[in-house]
Image (cartoon, rainbow, N blue to C red):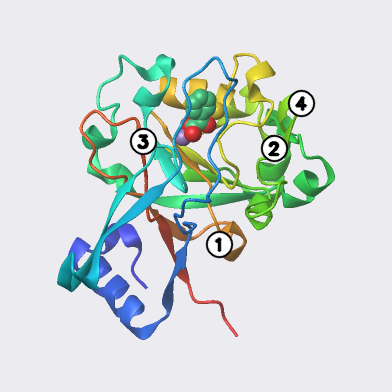
Amino acid sequence: MTTAAATSGADLLQALAAGLVSGSVEIVDLAHTLSPDFPVMVLPPEFGQCQPFRIEEVSRYDGRGPGWYWNNISMSEHAGTHFDAPAHWISGKNLPEATVDAIPLDRLARPAVVLDFSGESAKDEDFLLTRAHLEAWEAENGAIEAGSWALFRTGWSKHLGTAKYLNLREDGAHSPGPASDAMEFLVKERGIVGFGTETIGTDAGQGSHLSPPYPAHFILHGNGRYGLQCLDALDRLPTRGALLFAAPLKIRHGSGSPLRVFALVPRAED
Ligand code: 23J
Ligand code: MN
């Protein structure tokens, strides 16, 4: 067996293509379906609000267009399963290549490491992932590789369609997310390319009360890293070994975008 480093780009691509055709490499869809009833982030009323997905039929093989079907759509850049670029946050506003149209292409296909904290999140809806949790995780699973996506598995995607997804109460939303020491560790010491969550934001529902407020947004984007939110099917990914494709729309000066994010995984052995 040759190692990847000794294998030419042509051979690697040919092997991957063969795996896709034979089915030994499978594709897992990590995006939810965009629809007008997909929930969006709700901010305190003094702030501008993000608009949900809207769709309006232009014609459907009828008087408005006898031979064709098409729709007009509109939405927030942060509706549905979506990508956050560094310029989304004030901490990233002066960074180069900070908007979705300027993201270096090598970032669009990267390995993923799945951090499974679904058990903890089921017990505590405000579960905060800390550096200590990550160190314990690494002691069991090995170090998180530089250049990877860290995907925070909480089981939250199964709450979509219920009130528990946003879990809004008088005092705001309640959903799991990272503490600032976890984000500092992942970004500065592990060099992740980004952090992905099943919840409506990369931050905890109560993330505005942390220091800094919204630590995932502040630390990721202030360091030129990316966010993915409202991911689906993280329970179908291996802890390591998935190759994640996350290509946001090329919106001029865009802060983020809905996207069809998916992962290549080895077919489960039977
Ligand atoms: C704006 C303000 C606060 C947050 C967010 C957006 C998001 O989570 C988002 O979708 O990026 S927390
Ligand atoms: Mn967002």
Residue type at mark 1 is: Leu
Is the residue marked by circle 1 packed among few (<14), some (14-19), or many (20+) residues within 10 Å? many
SS type, badge 2: loop
**Label 2 C-beta lies within 8 Å of the nearest ligand 1 atom:** no
The one nearer the camera, 77 or 220, is 77
Res 68 → quadrant:
bottom left
The 10 Å Cα crowd at callout 3, few under 14, some 14 to 19, many 20 or more, is: many
> CB of mark 3 within 8 Å of CB of mark 2?
no
Q: Which one is in front in this view, the residue at disc 1 or the one at disc 4?
A: 4
**Could you tell me if residue 191 is visible in this image?**
no
Q: Quadrant of residue 264?
A: bottom left
Q: Dot 2 corresponds to which residue?
A: 176
Between tags 4 and 3, which lies in front? 4
Element at badge 4? loop
Kindly identify the amino acid type of the residue bearing the numbered disc 3: Gly
Which circle's residue, 3 or 2, is located before the other in the chain?
2
The answer to the question of whether label 1 and label 4 lie on touching residues, with beta carbons closer than 8 A, is no
Residue of label 4: 170
Is the residue indicated by label 3 positioned so its CB lies within 8 Å of ligand 2? Answer: yes
Q: Quadrant of the N terminus?
A: bottom left
Q: Tell me the quadrant of the picture where the C terminus can be found.
A: bottom right
The residue that mark 1 highlights is 237
Whether the residues at callouts 3 and 1 have beta carbons within 8 Å, the answer is: no
Q: Disc 3 designates what residue?
A: 256
Three-letter amino acid code at the position of disc 4:
Glu
Residue sitting at 35 percent across and 77 percent down? Answer: 19
130 is higher (above) or lower (below) than 57: above
Residue 205 falls in image quadrant: top right
The spot of residue 182 in percent (x, y) is 63, 29
